Image (cartoon, rainbow, N blue to C red):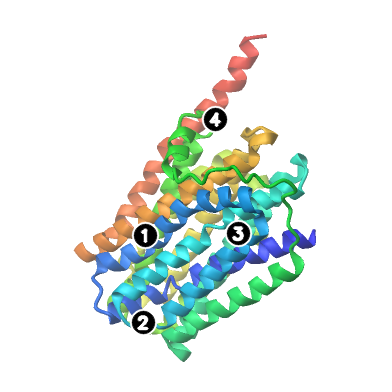
Amino acid sequence: MDRRLLILFLTIFIDLMGFGVFIPVIPIYARDLHASDALVGDLGAVFSLAMFICTPVWGSLSDRYGRKPVIMAAIALSALSYVLFAHATTLFLLVLSRVLTGIGSGNITAAQAYITDITPPQGRAKAMGIIGAAFGLGFIFGPPMGSFIFAQFGVEWVGYLAAALCLLNLMAVQAFLPESLTEKDGSRKVRVKPLTGAYRALKDLRFRDLYVVSFIFITAFSMMQMTIALLWIDNYGLNEKQIGLMFAAVGVASAIVQGGMIGWLQRTFGERKLMVYGSLCMAVGLGMIPFIPLSLFVPLSIVSILLLSLGNGCLNPTILSLLSRNAAQREQGEVLGTNQSFGSLARIAGPAMGGRLYGLGHALPYVSAAAIMLGALYWIRHFQRRQQAVPEASASGH
C-alpha cells in the first residue's frame, strides 16, 4: 500500500475509533451527571451534527490552504476535545467536548480530497474503499476498548487514551504525509451549505434509492447503538466490564462478516438478494433485543449480534459497491462523499430519536428501528425495479 494511503487510513481509523470509544461510555457517564434519556441520545446527535456541518468546511479550507495543514488542525482539535472530555464534570462541558470532537472529525473530506490528488481515476474507488474500511474498523474496535478503559481506569482515562492516539496520529502526519495539493486556491470561499448538497443529490435518480436505504439503515442501527448500554444496565443488570464484552462480541462478529464472509456471500447470493436479506436480518436482530428473557440473555444476545452483523455486512459493502458502479469515474469521490453525508444525517436522527423513545419505553427504540428497516425494503425493491428497467429501455432503443 502507498505510505500516504496508510497514513490516511490510520488518520480516519483513529478518528472513528475516537468516536467509537465513547459509544458505551457516554450514556453511562451522562447519567452519572444526571442527564435525561433524551439528552443521552442528543449527545450522540450533536457529535454527528457538528461533523455534518463542518465536513464541507474542512474540504473547502483544504482547497485554499492545502490538505496537510487542515488534516493536522482537525486532529489537534480532536485531541483537545478528548482532554476536555477527561475533565468534563458538568453536562455543559460534556456537550461542548462532543461538539468539538464532531468538528475535528469532519476532516474526512480533506482525506478524501487528498486521495483524489494522489490516485489516478481508475484507482480512486479502491482507495476510497480503504477509507471506508478504516471507518468500519474504527466502529468495531472503539466501543469495546472504551468500555474496558472506563471499567478499569475511569472516565478520565477514556479521554486521555483518545487524546494520546490523536497525538501519535499528528506526529505520523507531520513526519510521513507530504502535501498533495500542488496548486492552492487562495480565492476560494468557505461555504457552509451541507443540506444543499444532500437535497441536490436526492434529485439524481441513479443514486436516490441507495442514499435513502443507507440513511434508513444507519438511522436504525444508531438508534440501537446509543441506547443499548442503558438497556443492558436497566433490564439485565450488566456492569461496565460485561458491557465491554458485549461490544467486543459485536466487533468480532462484524469483523468476521465484513472481513471474511462478504465476498462469499456476494458470490453465493448476489447483490440483489443480499440487500433484501440484510434488511431482514437487521429488522429481526433489532426487534428481538428488548424481548430477550434474562434466563436466555447470552445465547439469544449472540443470535441478535450475529443477525445485526450479517445485516450490516450485507448492506454496507453492497450499497458502496452499487454506488461506485453506477457513478462515472469523475464523480466517484463526490458520490461516496455524499453517501457519507447521509450517514452523518442518520447519526443525527438515530440517537436523537432513540434517546427520546427509550425514555418513553425501553423497547421502543428497537421496535421502531426494526419497523423502519422493513420500510427500507420498499426503497430496495424500487431501486431494483429501476435497475431492471434501464437495460430493458436501452435494448428497446436499439
| Few, some or many residues within 10 Å of mark 2 (<14, 14–19, 20+) | some
First in residue order: circle 1 vs circle 3: 1
Asked whether disc 1 touches disc 3, contact meaning CB atoms under 8 Å apart, the reply is no
**To which quarter of the image does residue 156 belong?**
bottom left
Classify residue 59 as left or right of residue 25.
right
Residue found at x 66% / y 66%? 10
Classify residue 296 as left or right of residue 161.
left
Residue found at x 43% / y 82%? 86
Q: Which mark is residue 206?
A: 4
Residue lying furthest left? 360
Residue 380 visible, this angle: no
Q: CA distance from mark 4 to mark 1?
A: 29 Å
| Front position among marks 1 and 2 | 1
Residue lying furthest bottom? 153
Q: Secondary structure at mark 2?
A: loop
Q: Amino acid at mark 2?
A: Leu
Q: CA distance from mark 1 to mark 2?
A: 25 Å
Q: Amino acid at mark 3?
A: Val
Q: Picture coordinates of residue 60 (x, y %)?
A: 56, 47
Q: Which residue is mark 1?
A: 45
Q: CA distance from mark 4 to mark 2?
A: 46 Å
First in residue order: circle 1 vs circle 2: 1
Q: Secondary structure at mark 4?
A: loop
Residue found at x 42% / y 74%? 24
Name above or below for residue 9 compared with residue 269: below
Residue found at x 44% / y 46%? 215
Residue lying furthest right? 2
Quadrant where the C terminus sits is top right
Q: Secondary structure at mark 3?
A: helix
Q: Which residue is mark 2?
A: 238
